[in-house]
Image: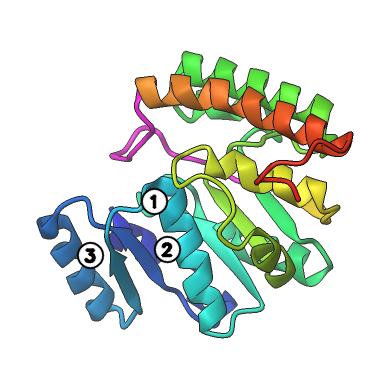
Amino acid sequence: MIEGLIQRIPMDALREVIISDNQYSPGDQEKTCSIAAKYNIPFFPHENFGYGGNVKYGLQKAMERGADYAVEIHGDGQFDPSVIPAALEKIRGGADFVMGSRFTNWKQPREDGMSLIRFIANILLSACARIVLRIPWTEYHGGLRAFSKKLIEVVGNKGSNDYIFDFQIIAIARYHNMNFSEIPVRANYKKEHTSISLPAAVVYFFQTFLVLIQYMLARIGIKNDLFR
């Protein structure tokens, strides 16, 4: 899956592509290492920090290598990487956080093969987040996102190492009054891809509301580790 993604990334829009890889199994990591070497891409394997830990590790490596901004895209190739230049244009224009949204045309995700339960859950969670965080995005749970150096430095190692980090980083950015933007992106659900399991998705669902509660409490002066 990752080789197909690499072949589709618009390399001329980026100074460098890196791979941050959780150690799910030695065989998978060896295969990814071989693909990275084939395309001369820096490869950073590590112990299994969890999904959020892997994202934070990758962003940290990008900063260590002198990045002014970073784009995160899931390695299964589900999200269309051709929109990366559009995301970077937004970052260079002053945005700190750019979300690749599948819902700028709300019918598109279902036409692309998103399951009904995930479609409904995404709309519900994004609507609740929009009410509390007041970021005018059509989606809060995408797998292609761009971050400014300023935002990455503010986030640091805050937040969970699990899936909920995806949402925590949004709330942290809002708490620190970052600039937000959005671009449309397509996702292909009809070919092989990885997705969060249903039990993990249920946990993520409830954790999202916990983050929103923590955010609202921090806004009225009751701080916590996530919002300081």
Q: Residues within 10 Å of mark 3 (few under 14, many from 20)?
A: some
The residue where tag 2 is placed is 8
Q: Amino acid at mark 2?
A: Arg
- Residue at 84% from the left image edge and 67% from the top image edge: 94
Mark toward the start of the polypeptide (3 vs 1)? 3
Asked if the residues shown at circle 2 and circle 1 are in contact, with their CB atoms under 8 angstroms apart, the answer is: yes
Mark seen at residue 77: 1
Q: CA distance from mark 3 to mark 2?
A: 16 Å
Q: Residues within 10 Å of mark 1 (few under 14, many from 20)?
A: many
**Number of the front mark, 3 or 1:** 3
Q: Position of residue 197 (x, y in %)?
A: 34, 27
Badge 2 marks a residue whose secondary structure is: helix
Does residue 142 appear in this view? Answer: no
Q: Amino acid at mark 3?
A: Thr
The residue where tag 3 is placed is 32
Mark toward the start of the polypeptide (2 vs 1)? 2
Q: Position of residue 43 (x, y in %)?
A: 32, 74
Mark toward the start of the polypeptide (3 vs 2)? 2
Residue 189 lies within the magenta run: yes
Q: Which residues are magenta?
A: 184-198
